[in-house]
Amino acid sequence: MNNCAIIISDRLDKTGNTVYLRDESWISTPFKACIFRLWNRQRSAFEHDFTEIGQVTDDYYLYLGPAEHNITALSENAVVLADDGKYEFKRRNEFKSGDDVLYYTGILKKIQGEYDYDDE
């Protein structure tokens, strides 16, 4: 692993929250990642949901995760499990330096009302 990726992973271990990745019946070992709420409604409107009474805006979050957990290889059904809930991926990207992945980013949407890791 690239030295920069090691430094980033070390910082995530110190500042991040414990999370798990789940994809169908597979679940990862716990690791540290950061999940930040995106506050700007215009910039965080990744999906438009129209109801009979108008447009509904959901809460979106930014995921920052270590290089050793490749979120781009997961299926569309993959979720992030954290202490405060369950999140689905809307976008997933890798941040690279040359050929080395330094960390992963993603846009998450909180799945409302689901907090139990064994809910499915």
Image: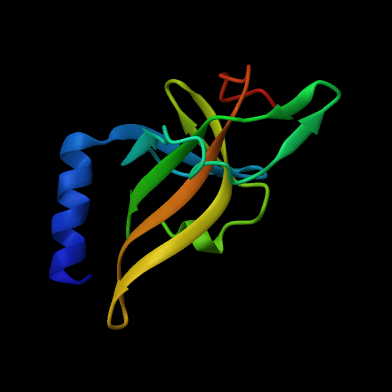
Q: Residue at x 81, y 20 (%)?
A: 53
Please provide percent x and percent y for residue 24.
67, 45
Q: Residue furthest bottom?
A: 98
In the rendered view, tell whether residue 41 sits above or below residue 63: above
Q: Residue at x 67, y 53 (%)?
A: 76
Q: Quadrant of residue 34?
A: top left
On screen, residue 15 versus residue 45, left or right, reads: left
Please provide percent x and percent y for residue 61.
45, 37
On screen, residue 8 versus residue 89, left or right, reads: left
In the rendered view, tell whether residue 110 sits above or below residue 71: above
Please provide percent x and percent y for residue 71.
48, 56
Please provide percent x and percent y for residue 31.
33, 41
On screen, residue 66 versus residue 69, left or right, reads: left
Quadrant including the C terminus: top right
The foreground one among 36 and 29 is 36
Q: Residue at x 32, y 82 (%)?
A: 99
Quadrant including the N terminus: bottom left
